[in-house]
Every structure is written in structure tokens, then in C-alpha cells.
Image (cartoon, rainbow, N blue to C red):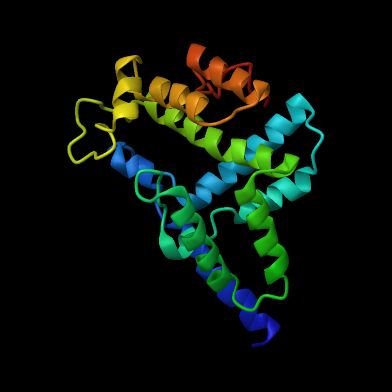
Amino acid sequence: MDKEQSVVEFYVLCNKLKYIIRTGWLEWNIKSDRLESVAEHIYGTQMLAIAMWSEYHYDIDIKKVLLMLSVHEMEEVLIGDLTMFDVDKNTKKQMGHDAVAKVLGKLASKEYIQNIIFEFDECKTPEAIFANQCDKFECDLQCKLYDENGCVDLQSQQGNKVINVDAVEKMLKSSNSLSEAWLKFGQQKYNYDANFRAVSNYCLQNSILLNTSSDNVEK
């Protein structure tokens, strides 16, 4: 296979991520003109990483983090967006690694990219720990945006298999909205550091929608 074919085949495969909708928003019957795709989630994690690195001065290789986040969902080209309620963690990891090997095909940098993904999944290095927090917290932020835009109706959840899960049901009962429950669940489920937890708490206490006519947005 020549280089030109490798480039095009890899691009065409990964382009599919633009059209794979994030499963959680479908499960929660989010009502919006368009729902977030996996590719948009990837972009969101990268922008969040830049902001967190900028404001909290993490001693990490931010370029490596951005590469890690750019490829961390590559598996979903073939296996789709599986949630924690669809398959156990270890099974998903193996499915993901098998899928990544196929997506990367015969790219010259296949081994390097696979190792970046393995590092992300093992979540032991400073870059991987930071990237994983960005991955999880971006979802919390997106839920908050959907909620503030009036896209969530907790009274209209026909077919939602997640809403009756014990941990989810308990969190909803102690919250005033889906996004509040989502943010609290994130804090309990994932090992956010003090900085991510501070931003999460800010979101619990404030609206995060930007007013484009506000002085907060530079023209």
C-alpha cells in the first residue's frame, strides 16, 4: 500500500466520527436540532485541555495530551460509542484495542499511535491522567449546556434504560436537574483533581452559557 492510499483510507475511516452521535445524549432523549458527534466531543476535550493547562499551569507535555485526545476515541469508528452501561470496562478496552489496530491499518506510525492510546487507557502518566479528566469532564460540561438550553425533559424519558440504574436514580433524586446530577456523578465516579473539581463546582453554582453581547467576550 502506498503512502497516498494509507493517508486517504485512514482519513475516510476517521471521518465517520463526524456522524456517530454520542450515545448518552440519545439515551437521555436530548431534544436539540443537532446532537454532539464523537468528533465534536474530541474537539471539546482538546479545547478543555488547553484551557485547564493555561489556567492551572499543569507540568505536562500539552502537545502529547492533544495528540492523545485526538486519537482516544478512534476505536468508535468500528465499535460505536459504548457507555459504561453497555459493556464492562475490560471488555470495552480489548474491543477498543482490536478496533484501533484495524483503523490504523498499515500507517507507518501505527505502533506509536497505539502506544499513545495504551498510555491513555492505563491512566498512569501525568499526561494520561490529565487527558482522562478532560475526557470525562467535557461530557459534564456538554450536559450542562444542553440543560441550560432547555434540551432536557426528565419527565419524557421513554425508553431510557439508564434512568432506573440505582446509582443514577439516587443521584437524580438528590438533584434539581440532569446536569446537576451529571456533575455530581462525575465528581463521585471519577478521580478529578482539585482543579477539575473546582471548575465542576463552579458549574454547579453558575450558568455557563455565554452571552455573545456581554463584555465577557472580547470583540
For the point 68% across and 52% down, the residue is 119
Asked whether 211 or 111 is in front, the reply is 111
For the point 65% across and 26% down, the residue is 193
Residue sitting at the far front: 90
Against 21, residue 13 (above or below) is below
Against 155, residue 110 (above or below) is below
Tag count: 0
Residue sitting at the far top: 205
Against 21, residue 6 (above or below) is below
| Residue 212 seen in the figure | yes
Rendering coords of residue 34 (x, y %): 37, 44
Q: In this view, does 15 lie to the left or right of 60?
A: left
For the point 77% across and 48% down, the residue is 63
Rendering coords of residue 115 (x, y %): 69, 60
Which part of the image, by quadrant, shows the C terminus?
top right
| Residue 34 seen in the figure | no
* The quarter of the displayed image where residue 1 is located: bottom right
Rendering coords of residue 162 (x, y %): 29, 37
Q: Is residue 40 left or right of residue 48?
A: left
* The quarter of the displayed image where residue 181 is located: top left
For the point 64% across and 43% down, the residue is 46
Rendering coords of residue 7 (x, y %): 64, 75
Q: Is residue 64 left or right of residue 49?
A: right
* The quarter of the displayed image where residue 62 is located: top right
